[in-house]
Image: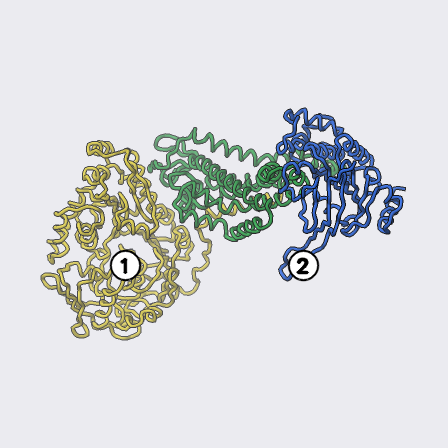
């Protein structure tokens, strides 16, 4: 658990800087001067209330969002937008989305969703797709029979497992989980979180885990980054931050979470 | 169903109704209830009147001819039977070689504004016509008009012109002052015809009022309005509802319901028009007389006329109509498809060759020509029917860009000189046919001053044209007039120029 | 899948209202009515495909002696003219049947051309976004500003007649509606997480469009194309009625109606049967199009 894999330095993203009819609108800085890193095999939690810029950070890392300033690199290779990434880098970082249903194309079967990766990245063992799909589904705790079903025929938790299987199909090094469990029931949340932790062990993945839920961070993350209004207000090992928060905002967040959980 | 479904249905039905019924009008409430004598006679003309100038580019058109006849007068005019009679001229003489014509004007002539009509007006009008861009101008190109006193006009032709009197039926006299500023003149024209112009909207309507200064018998009605109703079905609906009092040029299939209507009168009159279907003799496939004659035999014109034009046509016996000077009846060509096929084979006709291009203009002729094509196809002659827009048709006609041509050919002058004499000489090059004997006969007919010699010359010319099948001459056109039965004094005119001044409303 | 909500609704209605009459037959009746346009369209297709094999017709052949025969008359050859004959003695039933084939062929060809062009342009515009989208969207708006039928008349009038020209002239105004719908779907699908996921898996734009965008455009496009088919059939008849449509050697309802317009008072059957055939096709296809729009028009149902 030593080598730094993802490195984000001085990241800044501005919205609303498009030309207007009259004059130029002031750009809204969604993310400003954000720096953090993720080490090998580590799960980094990013917390903050909605609008704090955590999802924007996740999309920048995933390459779905262009950024104005700063650098993002993975294994010391700069990360551009997805369309500019070389295949090796492209497959290395995969994402699990918030809404399990809309992250799956409703017109495609589970097998087609999961197998999509293999048309771009032929992975050893994917030649026999049926078996490979069944293995992947088993890996995420799904019955191989769901392969022929459509997302609408699955529960939310099953959908999220399929999403995870799809991400794993590319044999990634890192998963970016953007509120990956917040749309699920509490009991299902726990199962998915367990699965993610389990996968980290088995596949040696590192993760960026975006959430507004401190309880979730506490369960899975090794270190945590707390964001407010687009900037990082505090970061450190989970236990340290939760035990002795430096910042009033973190304390506030913790307080709110305790109220909810008690 | 949903609201949208109903809307779609309504839309489709509406469009259908528009398709099937867009040619009928419904207004029928314009028949005046006022005193019968005050009523305007409503006329639906055959063609829209675009221009009132009888010396202008529209001068030869049927529409301008109609308006001119009401507004202006001529030196001479044709009788309904084709005889040339006096109009402005009281009398005329011609010298022996038909080069000098002397016209003596009536002595009581005035224009509608009260000024007298003099020989100076006639000469000025003649010069305006001859120098202008009217299609009629070439007919008067080598003729000089001179005034001899106020009441005598002398026309001197460079070459003998025995048909001049006939040509002068298309020459209308305007005040000499008209030439100075035609635009101002035609804004409020002054003429010596039975009517004056009340209002005129080009292409739509011409309203005429009785000319109280007319030198002849005054018009019996105070006013006449000639309007254009482009769709025949709409025109006839207007006639039946009383919106229109008089119309003509009614197609045959529309006559039947008019004839059975109690409040309408229908009459037909032989016109000067003959359906003329030239063969292009410069097309290799049609260069052989035997081929042309065989093709003529292959079409059952008798049946076509009997079914499609029972009232408005009869089999023609000459390229010109009986009312035209120079008419010489021939033996109609009998329908015999077997003989036609055999003769074509004997002449080596290529049945598998490129289709003959039969071109025409005017949708009203389409059924007739479709029937012709049907008969020719029956014996294996491929024909392509090409309907062309008028301007394209005229261009292609002159360029001989056709194999079979269809036209209604008339003789507005009531003289074969303007039909046979103009269209059939080799030099005219109108149909690719050239024959020295024909040229000689036509020259004699066009130049002799002896009516009997001319008549004989055109007879010989007609025999050549007929027997050589320069074209097919299937049908003599009859013009059908229909009017409300409360009109009296309507005389159907062979040229489509009815005289409105004799019409009155029965009270 | 879909009748489910209706069933529920009927059930609730029955539960809340006094049981005046059983709801089941009414529901059945509604389904029967809904099937009527499909049955009618089927009849047209059968007539278009099979009719010409059974009935012999040559538009060039004009048996004049049999002209203007009323429906049910016998021709001189002893045949029964079920729907009468036209002004040149040609059988009206044959014209209706052959006209069905012409209308269906022209309609399908036009709609296919318009849909392919419209889908391509619309999806490319919507999926690309940015400048490409702006330019294409403006082109669509400008083309839409011309009245479609006028544009078709101009094109068909300027170019010499023929089926290809008619199809092109009608497709010129038809593709825009399709393109706008396809663009709307593409814009909406583009921001869906599953396309993000696919992009992260390295799926190329062409494959992306085919796999993840077009399937969602298909429903609304088919629904719109059905409505457009009805309009095309009507417009083709209009062009032929005006004489700028198909050449006289092909049989078209528009031409038949035009041929009969002078005979509406004396021989109504020439225009009437072709007109009824046209109206029947247009109305039933329009109803089917509406049903499709209700079912698939919104794009994201399954």
- Up/down of C217 relative to B115, above or below: above
Q: Chain of mark 1?
A: B
Element at label 1 = loop
How crowded pointer 1 is (Cα within 10 Å; few <14, some 14-19, many 20+) is rated as: some
Q: Colour of chain C?
A: green
Looking at the image, residue C283 sits to the left or right of residue A24; the answer is: left
Give me the residue at 68% from left, 49% from top.
A67
Identify by letter the chain in yellow.
B
Identify by letter the chain in blue.
A
Give me the residue at 29% from left, 49% from top.
B396
Please name the residue that numbered disc 2 is placed on.
Answer: A25
Residue C297 x/y as whole percent = 62, 41
Q: Quadrant of the N terminus of chain C?
A: top right
Residue C152 x/y as whole percent = 46, 48
- Up/down of C9 relative to B496, above or below: above
Question: In which quarter of the view is residue C268 placed?
Answer: top left
Give me the residue at 26% from left, 54% from top.
B494
How crowded pointer 2 is (Cα within 10 Å; few <14, some 14-19, many 20+) is rated as: few
Q: Which mark is residue B460?
A: none
- Up/down of A31 relative to C279, above or below: below
> What sort of colour scheme is used for the picture?
by chain
Element at label 2 = loop
Please name the residue that numbered disc 1 is placed on.
Answer: B60
Looking at the image, residue B46 sits to the left or right of residue A199; the answer is: left
Q: Is residue C16 visible?
A: no
User: Camera-side residue: A77 or B112?
Assistant: A77
């Amino acid at each position: 658990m030593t080598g730094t894999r993802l490195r984000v330095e001085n990241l800044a993203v501005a919205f609303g800087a498009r030309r207007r009819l009259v004059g130029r609108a002031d750009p809204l800085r969604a993310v400003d001067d954000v720096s953090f890193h993720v080490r090998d095999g580590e799960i980094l939690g990013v917390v903050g209330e909605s609008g704090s810029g955590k999802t924007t950070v996740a999309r920048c890392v995933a390459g779905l969002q262009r950024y104005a300033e700063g650098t993002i690199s993975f294994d010391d290779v700069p990360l551009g937008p997805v369309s500019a990434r070389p295949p090796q880098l492209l497959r290395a970082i995969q994402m699990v989305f918030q809404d399990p249903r809309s992250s799956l194309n409703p017109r495609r079967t589970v097998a087609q969703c999961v197998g999509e990766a293999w048309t771009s990245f032929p992975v050893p063992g994917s030649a026999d797709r049926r078996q490979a799909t069944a293995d992947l589904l088993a890996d995420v705790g799904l019955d191989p029979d769901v392969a022929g079903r459509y997302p609408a025929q699955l529960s939310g938790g099953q959908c999220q497992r399929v999403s995870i299987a799809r991400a794993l199909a590319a044999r990634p090094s890192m998963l970016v989980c953007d509120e990956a469990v917040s749309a699920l029931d509490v009991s299902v949340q726990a199962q998915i979180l367990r699965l993610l932790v389990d996968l980290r062990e088995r596949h040696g993945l590192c993760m960026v885990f975006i959430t507004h839920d401190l309880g979730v961070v506490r369960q899975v993350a090794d270190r945590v980054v707390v964001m407010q209004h687009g900037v990082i207000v505090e970061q450190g090992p989970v236990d340290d931050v939760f035990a002795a928060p430096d910042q009033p905002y973190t304390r506030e967040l913790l307080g709110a979470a305790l109220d909810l959980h008690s | 169903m949903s609201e949208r479904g109903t809307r779609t249905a309504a839309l489709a039905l509406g469009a259908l109704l528009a398709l099937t019924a867009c040619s009928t009008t419904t207004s029928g409430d314009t028949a005046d209830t006022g005193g019968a004598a005050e009523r305007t006679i409503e006329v639906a003309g055959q063609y829209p009147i675009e221009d009132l100038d009888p010396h202008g580019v529209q001068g030869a058109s049927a529409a301008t001819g109609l308006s001119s006849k009401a507004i202006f007068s001529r030196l001479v005019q044709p009788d309904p039977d084709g005889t040339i009679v006096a109009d402005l001229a009281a009398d005329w003489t011609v010298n022996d070689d038909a080069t000098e014509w002397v016209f003596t004007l009536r002595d009581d002539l005035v224009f509608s504004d009260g000024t007298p009509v003099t020989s100076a007006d006639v000469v000025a009008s003649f010069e305006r016509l001859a120098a202008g861009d009217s299609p009629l101008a070439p007919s008067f190109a080598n003729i000089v008009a001179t005034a001899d006193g106020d009441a005598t006009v002398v026309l001197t032709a460079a070459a003998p012109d025995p048909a001049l009197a006939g040509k002068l039926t298309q020459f209308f006299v305007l005040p000499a002052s008209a030439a100075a500023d035609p635009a101002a003149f035609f804004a409020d024209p002054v003429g010596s015809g039975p009517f004056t112009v009340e209002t005129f909207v080009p292409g739509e309507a011409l309203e005429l009022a009785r000319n109280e200064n007319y030198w002849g018998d005054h018009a019996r009605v105070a006013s006449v309005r000639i309007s254009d109703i482009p769709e025949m079905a709409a025109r006839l609906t207007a006639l039946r509802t009383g919106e229109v009092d008089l119309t003509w040029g009614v197609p045959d299939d529309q006559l039947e319901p008019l004839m059975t209507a109690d409040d309408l009168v229908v009459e037909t009159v032989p016109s000067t028009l003959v359906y003329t279907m030239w063969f292009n003799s410069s097309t290799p496939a049609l260069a052989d007389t035997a081929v042309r004659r065989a093709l003529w035999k292959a079409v059952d014109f008798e049946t076509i006329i009997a079914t499609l034009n029972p009232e408005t046509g009869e089999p023609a016996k000459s390229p010109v109509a009986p009312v035209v000077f120079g008419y010489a009846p021939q033996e109609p060509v009998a329908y015999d498809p077997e003989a036609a096929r055999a003769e074509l084979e004997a002449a080596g006709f290529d049945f598998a060759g490129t289709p003959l291009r039969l071109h025409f203009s005017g949708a009203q002729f389409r059924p007739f020509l479709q029937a012709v094509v049907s008969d020719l196809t029956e014996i294996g002659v491929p024909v392509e029917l090409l309907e062309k827009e008028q301007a394209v048709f005229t261009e292609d006609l002159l360029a001989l860009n056709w194999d079979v041509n269809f036209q209604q050919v008339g003789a507005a002058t009531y003289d074969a000189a303007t039909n046979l004499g103009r269209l059939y000489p080799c030099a005219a090059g109108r149909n690719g046919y050239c024959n020295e004997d024909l040229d000689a006969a036509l020259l004699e007919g066009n130049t002799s001053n002896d009516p009997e010699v001319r008549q004989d010359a055109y007879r010989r010319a007609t025999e050549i044209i007929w027997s050589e099948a320069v074209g097919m001459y299937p049908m003599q056109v009859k013009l059908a007039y229909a009017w409300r039965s409360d009109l009296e004094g309507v005389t159907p005119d062979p040229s489509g120029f009815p005289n409105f001044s004799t019409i009155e409303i029965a009270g | 899948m879909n009748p489910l909500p209706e069933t529920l609704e009927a059930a609730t209605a029955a539960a809340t209202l006094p049981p005046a009459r059983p709801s089941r037959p009414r529901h059945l009746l509604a389904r029967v009515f809904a099937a009527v346009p499909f049955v009618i369209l089927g009849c047209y297709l059968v007539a278009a495909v099979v009719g010409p094999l059974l009935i012999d017709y040559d538009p060039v052949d004009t048996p004049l002696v049999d002209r203007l025969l009323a429906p049910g008359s016998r021709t001189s050859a002893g045949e029964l003219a079920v729907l009468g004959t036209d002004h040149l003695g040609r059988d009206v039933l044959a014209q209706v049947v052959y006209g069905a084939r012409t209308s269906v062929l022209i309609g399908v060809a036009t709609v296919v051309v318009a849909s392919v062009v419209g889908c391509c342009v619309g999806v490319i515009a919507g999926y690309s976004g940015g400048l490409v989208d702006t330019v294409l969207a403006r082109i669509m708006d400008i083309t839409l500003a011309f009245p479609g039928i006028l544009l078709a008349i101009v094109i068909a009038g300027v170019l010499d007649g023929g089926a290809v020209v008619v199809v092109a002239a009608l497709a010129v105004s038809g593709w825009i509606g399709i393109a706008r719908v396809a663009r709307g779907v593409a814009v909406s699908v583009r921001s869906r997480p599953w396309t993000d996921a696919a992009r992260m898996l390295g799926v190329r734009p062409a494959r992306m469009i085919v796999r993840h965008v077009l399937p969602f455009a298909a429903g609304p496009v088919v629904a719109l194309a059905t409505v457009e088919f009805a309009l095309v059939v009507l417009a083709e008849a209009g062009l032929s009625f005006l004489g700028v449509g198909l050449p006289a050697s092909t049989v078209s309802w528009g031409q038949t109606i035009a041929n009969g317009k002078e005979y509406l008072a004396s021989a109504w059957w020439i225009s009437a049967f072709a007109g009824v055939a046209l109206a029947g096709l247009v109305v039933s296809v329009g109803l089917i199009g509406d049903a499709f729009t209700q079912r698939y028009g919104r794009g994201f149902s399954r």
